[in-house]
Amino acid sequence: MILVTGGRGAVATTLLVLLRADGLAVRVGSAHPGQLRVPADVPTVACDLAEPTTFPAALADVTSVFLYAEGTTISEFVTAATEAGVEHIVLLSSSSVLDPDAATNPVAKSHLDAELGLAGAPMTVSVLRPGAFAGNARSWAWAINAGQPISLPYPNAYGDPIHELDIAEAAYSLLTKPDSRGGQYNLTGPETLTFTAQLDRVAQVIGRTIAIDHVTPEVWKHQMAEHIPAHFADGLLAYWRRCDGVPSPITDDVSTLTGRPARSFTSWLEENAAVFTG
């Protein structure tokens, strides 16, 4: 039995499809299992990663886990997984754990704490560290659809947008093929792109010009105040400041795990063009 946590997430939902296609026994966990949209034959269970009392029932008879990073309760999760006889955990972490301020940056800290909490676990632990999800481009959709400029405090900050399907396929490989288990994999898209270049790709795909408003970090933080907690906004700004004008390193880890090259950012945009033309 494989437990997939974070059942409403983009990676988890795609991973479920891949595992079911192989006829594998899968259970999907979520803090709100009643809101899950899964096939009728897929069992669901309450698994709130911030609430350890939900762990024992979720982990009963489970041999492998796809785990979203929650650093505050990782020791309790390891204890419950050990008692349940779990043999393998695939952690969805983040490349932000490699940043110099990972221990204090709120964007990275939960992932780092989860990795550290699993470091001494008795079961095999595989770690996936993706960079920026290609799906983060969805945050621009409202402004693009409204014909408004995109506010960017660091328009020349680089990223390595990775297609969520590549992350899911990497997790699938680790869960189903024992040869690669136990490693740490830094997952990136096939190219490093500034925010400006990413928006140029969006414009090419939808056939419409997209304006950029180069704002100060303070103005951007104020604009985002209703959507992003201040400490997370500060963490993002610190990360973008470091990436300003600095290309992101690209890895072959997607290919190593899946046997094929990572999908391009443009391919994600073409698949999701309706998001920006609604």
Image (cartoon, rainbow, N blue to C red):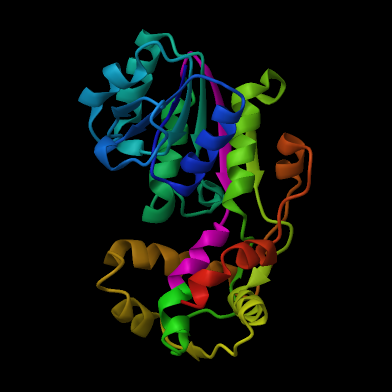
Extreme-right residue of the structure: 260
Viewer-closest of 173 and 196: 173
Q: Is residue 107 toward the left or the right of residue 275 in the image?
A: left
Q: Does 203 sit above or below residue 16?
A: below
Q: Does 268 sit above or below residue 139?
A: above
Viewer-closest of 172 and 127: 172
Viewer-closest of 104 and 137: 137
Q: Which residue corresponds to the image point at 58% horizontal and 54% vertical from the top-left?
A: 131
**Number of numbered discs overlaid on the protein picture:** 0
Q: Which residues are magenta?
A: 121-139
- Whether residue 193 is visible, yes or no, is yes
Q: Position of residue 109 (x, y in %)?
A: 40, 47
Q: Does 157 sit above or below residue 85?
A: below
Q: Quadrant of residue 257?
A: top right
Q: Is residue 272 toward the left or the right of residue 43 in the image?
A: right
Q: Position of residue 255 (x, y in %)?
A: 76, 42
Is 138 colored magenta in this rendering?
Answer: yes
- Whether residue 183 is visible, yes or no, is no
Q: Which residue corresponds to the image point at 42% horizontal and 38% vertical from the top-left?
A: 68
Q: Which residue corresponds to the image point at 68% horizontal and 62% vertical from the top-left?
A: 267
Q: Is residue 47 toward the left or the right of residue 114 in the image?
A: left
Q: Position of residue 142 (x, y in %)?
A: 41, 77
Q: Position of residue 88 (x, y in %)?
A: 52, 19
Q: Is residue 205 toward the left or the right of residue 78 in the image?
A: right
